Image (tube, rainbow, N blue to C red):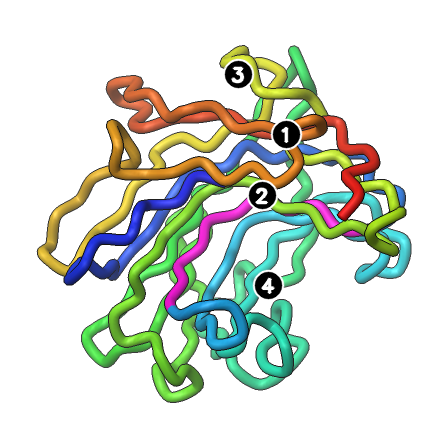
Amino acid sequence: MIQMRYLPGRSYTRVQGNIAVYNPNVKQGDSYAAIQIINGEEYKTNAINTGWMVSPTIYGGAKYSIFFTHWTTDGSKTTGCLNLNCPGFVQIDRRVYPGAPITNVSIPYGPHFEIAVSIFKDLFGSWWVSYDGINIGYYPAKIFNNFANPQIVGWGGVVVTPNPPTGVSPPMGSGVFPDRKYEHSCYIRFAQYTNNLGIEDGPHGDNYEKIIDCPSHYSVRDPVYRGNLGYTFDFGGPGGKCGS
């Protein structure tokens, strides 16, 4: 995961990215590729995530990529949910819905497909989710308790391991380690944010940090600026036994 470093007085009103879509071979657990906006610590965390996920556990054995959104106000301890599984998300445009299968999926060294997603705050403090340029709906400001000025945004991959610490963690991204060969590794391009000063920028220099919990099985490359492709990086890995 690539996350912007905390800076006193700095907050964010938008995060976006174009995420390459794959179908990693997830047998158990969950595998996500997403953007996120966060505020608060651990069990007080307010957050919104959106992107794609593969989870046969959650989706009745389905092993294909699904567009998802997720929210919480306490680090998912007791609040929030995926998609439309609880009150919270207000859907406005019906062309795309949270929980929808993604039909166009990348093949290593073959056709490549992306989804362009963003999370942004409107003038009323509500947080909108956009998919391929469609503002599909929003999370009302009133469902959050500490989200007026979120201080962290991020991009990348996350996995959920079944039966930790002995379970086998699923693949992330395309299932290969990142090597900047974007024809087969999962990537995010146009990684960009807007901050409370109205500045639009992306992760570069020392303004971000890399979060890698299990480096023997997953990794993420430093973002590079690629002109009209914006800030781009790749991430992923084959998974395996990460222990505790």
Could you tell me the amino acid type at mark 2? Ala
Q: Are marks 2 and 1 in contact (CB under 8 Å)?
A: no
Marks 4/3 in contact by CB < 8 Å: the verdict is no
Decide which of 179, 92 is in the foreground and name it: 179
Q: State the predominant SS element of the stretch in magenta.
A: strand
Residues at discs 2 and 4 in contact (Cβ within 8 Å): no
N-terminal of the pair, mark 4 or mark 1, is 4
Q: Is residue 94 one of those drawn in magenta? A: no
| Amino acid type, callout 3 | Tyr
- Mark 3 vs mark 2, CA separation in Å: 15 Å
Callout 2: helix, strand or loop? strand
- Label 2, on which residue? 33
Q: Which residue is mark 3?
A: 182
Disc 4 is placed on an element classified as: loop
Numbered circle sitting on residue 215: 1
Q: Which residue does the image show at 55% across and 32% down from the upper left?
A: 20
Q: Earlier in the sequence, mark 4 or mark 3?
A: 4
Of badges 4 and 3, the one in the foreground is 3
**Rendered view: 80 above or below 59:** below
Q: Residue at x 80, y 43 (%)?
A: 243
Q: Could you say whether the residue bearing mark 3 is in a helix, strand or loop?
A: loop
